[in-house]
Amino acid sequence: MEKLISTDHNFSIDFKKLNLPVMIVLSIITLGAYIGVWFLRNRQSIQNSHYKTGIHFGLWRVFTLGSFIFLFIHFFGNLVLSDYGLANIESYEIIFNFFFIGFLYYSIFRLRESFEEEADVILNKYLLFFLHVFYIQYKMNQLQDSQTNVKG
């Protein structure tokens, strides 16, 4: 895993280069729970940056675990729960998903501030809003490719 260094030589972040189509397929299969996995997987890279993002990774653990629990209930809940129980769980899942989305956008835009501050990477706010972690990973892959081309 290579460190990414910007033009100002103060920025170093070790995001692992990931295949975007694989990320998208994993997100579809897990109904979005992979987004939490992505944040937890890149936790060290984000925390090691000079700019403090203010992203709380304990909450990402909770949201990731909750997402997988709701995913499990979605597929296997009808084996142990009645229709009334499933309706109750679904209402909790809707509330959970609103908090998940809010925390996702908080985290993504905090990352945007960090990257723009440290690496002089310009992130389009509209693409970031619609593509969130996929766009961040795309830009980090692009930055890593440009760094390897400069070194090679």
Image: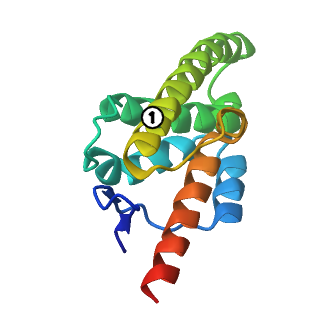
Quarter placement of the N terminus: bottom left
Q: How is the image coloured?
A: rainbow
Q: Quadrant of residue 75?
A: top right
- Residue 66: give x, y in percent of width and height: 48, 30
- Residue 127: give x, y in percent of width and height: 71, 40
Q: Please state which amino acid type lies under the numbered disc 1.
A: Glu
Left or right placement of residue 103 versus residue 79 in this view: left
Left or right placement of residue 28 versus residue 105 in this view: right
Query: Is 101 located above or below residue 127 in the figure?
Result: above
Left or right placement of residue 68 versus residue 32 in this view: left
Residue at x 62% of width, y 68% of height: 19
Q: Quadrant of residue 151?
A: bottom left
**Mark 1 surroundings: few (<14), some (14-19) or many (≥20) residues within 10 A:** some
Camera-side residue of 63 and 83? 63
Q: In this view, which residue lies farthest toward the bottom?
A: 152
Residue at x 59% of width, y 38% of height: 72
Query: Is 69 located above or below residue 9 in the figure?
Result: above
Number of numbered callouts drawn = 1
Camera-side residue of 11 and 33? 11
- Residue 26: give x, y in percent of width and height: 65, 55
Q: In this view, which residue lies farthest toward the front?
A: 8
Q: Quadrant of residue 14?
A: bottom left
> Disc 1 on helix, strand or loop?
helix
Camera-side residue of 122 and 141? 122
Residue at x 70% of width, y 51% of height: 29
Location of mark 1 (residue)? 113
- Residue 101: give x, y in percent of width and height: 59, 24
Query: Is 19 located above or below residue 118 in the figure?
Result: below
Query: Is 131 located above or below residue 45 in the figure?
Result: above
